[in-house]
Image: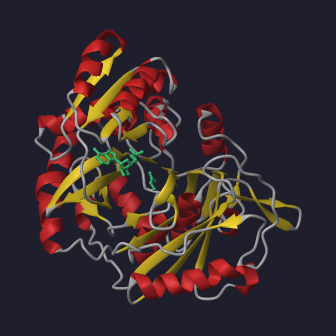
Amino acid sequence: MNILILGSGGREHTFAWKISQSSLCNQIYIAPGNAGTQQHGTNVAINPMDFEAVKKLTIDKNINLVLVGPEAPLVAGIYDFFKKDADLQDIPVIGPSAKGAQLEGSKAFSKAFMAKRNIPTAGYREFTQATIQEGLAYINQQTPPIVLKADGLAAGKGVLILNDVEEAKMEFSAMLDGKFGAASEKVVIEDFLDGIEFSVFVLTDGKDYKVLPIAKDYKRIGEADTGLNTGGMGAISPVPFVDEVLMQKVTQRIIIPTVKGIAADELDYKGFVFIGLIKVGDEPYVIEYNCRMGDPETEVVLPRLENDLLELLVALAEGKLNEIDIKISEKAATTIMLVSGGYPETYEKGKVITGFNKVTDSILFHAGTKQAGDDIVTNGGRVLAITSYGDDFKSALAISNKNANLIEFDKKNYRTDIGFDL
Ligand code: AMP
Ligand code: GLY
């Protein structure tokens, strides 16, 4: 089979690495890819949001399956674009329809979806410019922290957690005034949940489902979870506190009603559901849904998956997911993200990366890198994910830390304390 992977991060490099191990795999194309993905296939310099260019590539390269990494093309309807086109409609796209992607693309949609099925999540209200006064009055009645969420996609920046009522009112008004453009024309105000987060990844065809390894990512830039939020500075899998009792609750109260809800609402969903969860006391609540895999969670989830990923995706596309048994390694995996100094605010690109050949015992997944002549240079905030295995996440972390020290680029930054709170 010829596979097209859309995206350019560590998640997509991990997809390419895993699919290249499949006996079903012939050629892999990655659009646009990075310096790591080209180890497993051919990078093609097109933007995944340019559906006509994706179509041309799919036809020219005789693609048999498209795996969509990031959320933006899904929310914009790449699945539907394929289904409506006579030349493309038989080529499976892994990822939901635009309607299904609303689980991530609209907080109001996902909150209503959960409310309808009593899926445990924070209580909430939604407001627009027309109901701004009610919103301000609502905030006045709250005890901080106050959680404000832009309804739409805001590049991971649309959630604000504020410790002061007056500041929350200012931010709320600014959001409705267009702080995040159209994404914050509607704002959801949620109850604050105090607990510890983890992530569950479900593959579903809207009928059956399979649960992939559980993970936890570390989003803050600073050690001990301090400083600004990032896309993710590291991750571990499995998560020690997620035991069978907790997973039973997650399955019964969250996963099964979610898959049933997808079917009942006819969301046309053949892809990943990333369920961001928080454990409050002993009970799980949904923080958010995403319609794709996580990054850097993919860099620890797929290394622990022993199945042939392509076989799994083909079964998904053919509605035969129930014929597959998921096999998960007993080993733990930990990943550390090397980032550009300054990230998640401003940072420089184009720094030469050295030390690749000094790395032993880890897998390097490229995130923001590109080939520049004979050099590999930085090309984003998150640069390289260093994944290692171990008997537990701590022994895996020690190997990733050793190798994080051996890779060099100007203003390299990373966290050494992934899993510190466990
Ligand atoms: P998101 O950008 O949607 O991933 O949300 C960013 C982070 O905000 C989450 O990972 C949580 O740490 C936090 N968060 C979101 N909603 C809540 C909530 N209701 N209570 C507490 N923390 C939350
Ligand atoms: N690491 C969080 C995400 O992929 O959204």
Q: Quadrant location of residue 316?
A: bottom left
Name the spot of residue 151 as percent of width and height, x first: 37, 29
Q: In the rendered image, is residue 269 in sight? A: yes
* Residue at 55% in and 70% down: 415
Give the colour scheme shown: secondary structure
Quadrant for the C terminus, please.
bottom left
- The image shows residue 403, relative to residue 364, as above or below, that is below
* Residue at 32% in and 31% down: 165
Name the spot of residue 31 as percent of width and height, x first: 64, 49
| Side of 83 where 59 appears, left or right | right
Q: In the rendered image, is residue 318 in sight? A: no
* Residue at 32% in and 68% down: 214
- The image shows residue 213, relative to residue 85, as above or below, that is below
Q: Is 143 in front, or is 399?
A: 143
| Side of 145 where 84 appears, left or right | right
Name the spot of residue 142 as percent of width and height, x first: 22, 33
Q: Quadrant location of residue 244?
A: bottom left
Q: Quadrant location of residue 200?
A: bottom left
